[in-house]
Each structure stands twice: as structure tokens, then as C-alpha cells.
Amino acid sequence: MSLLAFQHVQLADRECPERLLLDDICLELDDGEMVAIWGKRRSGRSSLLRLACGLIAPDGGTVSFDGRPLRGPAIGDGIAYCTGVSRIGEAWSVQRELVEVQLARGTSRREARARAGAALERTGAEHLAERLLRSLRGADQVRVMLALALSGQPRLLLIDDVAAGVPLVERMAILRLLRALADEGMAVLSSTDETPALAGADRALSLSDGRLHGRVAAELAEVVHLRAAGG
């Protein structure tokens, strides 16, 4: 069973209801897999990610997470969605923001602090702990955004164009971090309109005219039939 599954999903264009923004989308994503979706602006790739975390509902078909159809927003319930650094409490320090987000989800203060520290260390952002959120730019902003996501200990990480505008050298470091998270067992689904951001993905798909193109499910390993010794 796939961790995330789109089954014949359709989504109408809210600005032009007679047009399908997404048409018959089928996609499967497993634990430990990194999948990148390339598409032009207004291709529907951001909407696809919002469907993947239940922020919007499909007009047809189903989106399932861990075997259950999504019936509403699932951010914080095994799913993290990254589109930029949270602006809630933007006058706070990075450390306080990470702790406050966890407290709002019912985590104890002691556990919230531990998760915040671990997330900052994992993303290489521990040196930013006392910086104000509003002062961050470029790769520093992306690393803190990822730390905010990881502090919730998600199984699925959704990344929407987060490295846009980040210098190439720093961007590659971010992509290596995402690859490492997938290697540790997290599912990563990203969207981009820049081909360098496809680096490190297990599968790279394209989205155009409402349709996904490419390998929408991981290939199964070849079955090798074993023979008894001497057979």
C-alpha cells in the first residue's frame, strides 16, 4: 500500500470552471521515496500539493494518505506542507517559533523544545536559533522552513518551489538535504518550474494540460524465483 495515492483525481480551474486544471491524475508515493513534479506557472502543480495534504478537495477521484481518503486538512497529522517560512509570530526568534508551533498542537513544552533543537540540527540551522524570522533570506529561510516542518515529525513532506531564487550552490545543498531525508525513510514530494530542482529525485514527472507525464508509480523489483539447493 502506497503512503500517498491519487486515484483518477480531477480538479476544476476556479477561475475558469469549465476547464479542468487537473485531469485524471494518478500518482503513488511510498515511504523513503523522493518524487519531483515539474510544471510551468499555473500548470496546477501547487494545487496538486494542496490536494495531497487535504487543503482543497478534488472535484473527482480520491486522494488517500496511509490508506485513508483525506477528508480535510491533514497538516500536522503525518504531513508537512512547505511553501515558505510561517509568518505567524514573525517578530519571534526561530527557536520560539518552532516551540510555539508544537505547543499549539498539544505537545508538552519539554518535548517541543527537544523537537525544535533536533529539527534545527538536522537542517543545519542551529546557528539561526536566535535570529528573527523576518530577518531570514535565501537558504537560511529555506532551512528554517524545513526545520518547522520536521519538528512535527511528518512521514510525508510536501515542498512547493521553496528553493526558487536561492543561489545554485546553496540550492544543491538543500536538495541534498531532501535526498537524505528520503533516504532516512521520509516521503518527499516537491514541485518546481526549474529543472535543476529535479536533482536527486527517484522519479521526475512533468505536469502539462492537466495531465501528469512520467512514471506515476515506483517500479516493482523483479521477482527472482529461488530454487532449492541441488534442484
Image (tube, grey):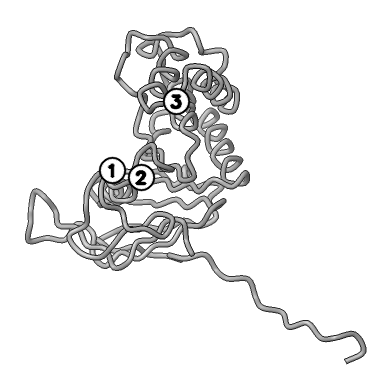
Give the residue displayed 78% in from the left and 82% down from the top: 226
Q: First in sequence: mark 1 or mark 3?
A: 1
Q: First in sequence: mark 2 or mark 3?
A: 3
Residue 57 vs residue 22, the one in the foreground: 57
Q: Nearer the viewer, mark 2 or mark 3?
A: 3
Disc 2 versus disc 3: distance between alpha carbons? 36 Å
Mark 1 nearby-residue class (10 Å; few <14, some 14–19, many ≥20): some
Rendered view: 96 above or below 64: above
* Position in image of residue 182 (x %, y %): 57, 46
Q: Which residue is mark 3?
A: 107
Q: Secondary structure at mark 1?
A: loop
**In which quadrant of the rendered view does residue 84 lie?**
top left
Q: Secondary structure at mark 2?
A: loop
Give the residue displayed 31% in from the left and 14% down from the top: 89
Which numbered dot is residue 193? 2
Q: Which residue is mark 1?
A: 73
* Position in image of residue 122 (x %, y %): 59, 28
Residue extending farthest to the bottom is 231
**Where does the C terminus fall, quadrant-wise?**
bottom right
Give the residue displayed 46% in from the left and 8% down from the top: 131
Kind of residue indicated by mark 3: Thr
Residue 113 vs residue 224, the one in the foreground: 113
* Position in image of residue 208 (x %, y %): 28, 59
* Position in image of residue 154 (x %, y %): 47, 40
